[in-house]
Image (cartoon, rainbow, N blue to C red):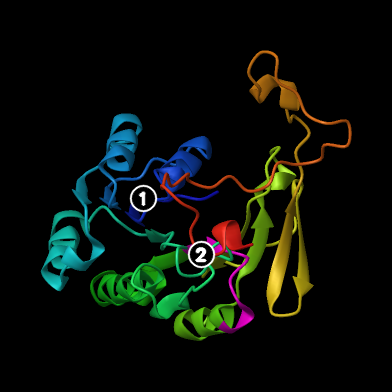
Amino acid sequence: SGDWSSDVCSSDLVGGASQALHLCDIQPVVHVMIELLPEARRCTRTHHRVWREYDDIKAVTSQDVRSWHMAHADAVDTVLLVAGFPCVDLSSLKADRQGIDGPSSGLIHEAIRIHKELVSFFGADNVIRLFENVESMPESERLRINALLDLEPMLIDAADVSHCRRPRLYWTDSTPISGRDATVTQKVGLKHVELESKRLPPVAAFLEANCGVSQDFKKFPTFTRPRPRAYPGKKPAGL
């Protein structure tokens, strides 16, 4: 809740941040999207008002951020930087993962660079970060990210409000608190946020005709993007 007036989205989780703001009845004054996949950019552009978009986070310069400030500083009092940086080098599905030293997950450093630029133009008190990645990363990598951001993450699993597991870590400048639909518990090294949903449709509503689940079904495992190939990779699916 509150009077939010700007949303600057970096790697916008295929428009997830914009959709979340929409569901909270928050209309950003300006939306800057940084997204590699053209399909994801088109999806976000179709459903949300996008002011400017980039297909490469490395292409965003200090001059770009300066131009954002010059164009919208008078209308903006809060900047929300949402960075769902790639999980490829952090996920347990990759046997030889390199962590944030890898070429994909290492893009967190670019998001941090943009955060510093936003702070320099809009002011530290006006910029809120929300970084996201997989819970299955090694603890050593989580601690490295904590140190880079100077933040402790919170753990949220989409299984609380859906039929599919998707445990994710979120680092944010905003402190979560327990409320009507959420319970926050302090764990070792992170906060665990448990969500409550009273209106979850039955799993059958999501299945095609003649499909079903076993009697002991609880939740689907995390869905992942299929990668067609002629032969199995090294330790496929992390096995």
Q: Which residue is mark 1?
A: 5
Which image quadrant for residue 169?
bottom right
Instruction: Name which residue lies at 66% across and 47% down.
Output: 158
Dot 2: what SS? loop
Would you say residue 132 sits in the magenta stretch? yes
Magenta-drawn segment: 131-140
In the image, is residue 153 above or below residue 40?
below
In the image, is residue 221 above or below residue 102?
above
Task: Residue 172: give x, y in percent of width and height.
Answer: 52, 67
In the image, is residue 153 above or below residue 5?
below
Would you say residue 17 sits in the magenta stretch? no
Crowdedness near tag 1: few (<14), some (14–19) or many (≥20) residues, C-alpha within 10 Å = some
Q: Inspect this view and state whether residue 60 appears.
A: no
Q: Which residue is mark 2?
A: 234
Q: Is residue 207 left or right of 78 when viewed as pictured?
A: right
Residue 28's disc number: none
Task: Residue 130: give x, y in percent of width and height.
Answer: 47, 63
**Amino acid on which the number 2 mark rests in the picture:** Lys
**Amino acid on which the number 1 mark rests in the picture:** Ser
Mark found first going from the N terminus, 1 or 2: 1
Q: Nearer the viewer, residue 236 or 178?
A: 236
